[in-house]
Image (spheres, grey):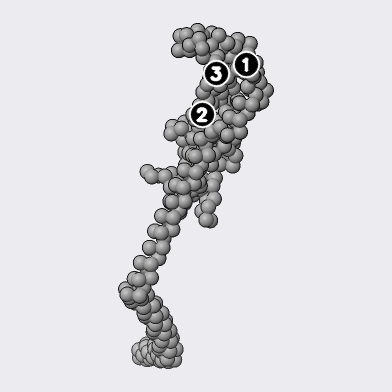
Amino acid sequence: MSFAKSKNDFSKKDMNFFSEFSSATSQQISSAFPIFLLATVAILAITLIVWIVCGIQIMNKQNKINDIKKEMNSAEYQQRLAAKDKSQAEVEQLRSYYYEISTLDSKIASKTVAASSTLTTCKDCMPNDTVMTAYDNLDGVVTISGQSINRESALNYLHLLEEKGLFAAIEDSIKPFDPIELGYKKNDLWFGNMNYSFTFTCTLKGYVTLTYASFIDGATPTPLSVLSTEHFNVGSDYTLPNIATYSQDGVEYKLTNVKINGTAVTPERLTEIINKNELGGKISGNTNIELMYTANNGGES
């Protein structure tokens, strides 16, 4: 009987324990729920505010985009755009004209001809026993033909021309002649006096020309600079310094090709030119050099 009573008391104690535990847990949950609810509401409010702000910013940007599109599609903007394109086309056309005119001017300058003072000097230093029968000038070569009493007179005239320093080189041809074979008659003024004919082929100093210009490389090269011309004697050394890069209008260009008289240099030669930052050599004849460049960003200005 006492055992049953003690068992019932133990069961009552267990039930009281579980009841007290459940009541404590419920009280804790009840007290935490308002905090959880408040945190949830705060998160939702912050999310809503962020969404509204982002929406307003997107709407403002879209409005600006719409305004820009509207302005671009307006007749006034199209007129300004057309005027700008026309101005750019006119500028490019003027640049092209300027390049062509400068190129022609440089080419004309490269065609060295004998000045009138050259003819005067050739006449003034002629000995009395010598006559000039022809004086021609073509592409920087002056040809003087004449007659002299003897070979020594022709040679004397040749030495006088050389002393004047008018020419880089003179090739001479002195030959005896028969006046009758040349059509002279016995009553002609110089019959019996002139026994030698001569022809002096004289190369003007500086006739050999070096022309060079810079271009943007491409199917149709675009000029970066006007054509420059320098005059040299045959066999002279020439140097074009600081050519590895080229700057114009804030754009930096790098050398990618070099053409000499229309023929591109070898890759090895190009690498050597870029590393030395200069192009040089001996000039043996008229030489045209094209320096081809590419913008560092890979495009054209």
Measure the alpha-carbon separation of dots 1 and 3: 11 Å
Measure the alpha-carbon separation of dots 3 and 2: 15 Å
Q: Badge 3 is on which residue?
A: 146
Quadrant location, the N terminus: bottom left
Left or right: 296 in relation to 160: left
In the image shown, does 214 or 22 lie closer to the viewer? 214
For the residue marked with disc 2, what is the amino acid?
Asn
Measure the alpha-carbon separation of dots 2 and 1: 24 Å
For the residue marked with disc 3, what is the amino acid?
Gly
In the image shown, does 299 or 102 lie closer to the viewer? 102
Q: Secondary structure at mark 2?
A: strand
Disc 2 and disc 1 in contact, CB within 8 angstroms = no
Q: Can residue 130 be spotted in the picture?
A: yes
Crowd class of label 3 (few under 14; some 14 to 19; many from 20; radius 10 Å): some
Q: Earlier in the sequence, mark 1 or mark 3?
A: 1
Q: Badge 2 is on which residue?
A: 137
Query: Between tags 1 and 3, which lies in front?
Result: 1
Quarter of the rendering containing residue 16: bottom left
Q: Earlier in the sequence, mark 2 or mark 1?
A: 1
As drawn, the label of residue 181 is none
Quadrant location, the C terminus: bottom left
Furthest residue to the front?
A: 187
Q: Position of residue 236 (x, y in %)?
A: 60, 28
Q: Position of residue 166 (x, y in %)?
A: 62, 27
Q: Badge 1 is on which residue?
A: 129
Q: Earlier in the sequence, mark 3 or mark 2?
A: 2
Q: Secondary structure at mark 3?
A: strand
- Identify which residue is drawn at 49% across, 46% down: 102
- Identify which residue is drawn at 60% across, 11% down: 149
In the image shown, does 29 or 33 lie closer to the viewer? 33
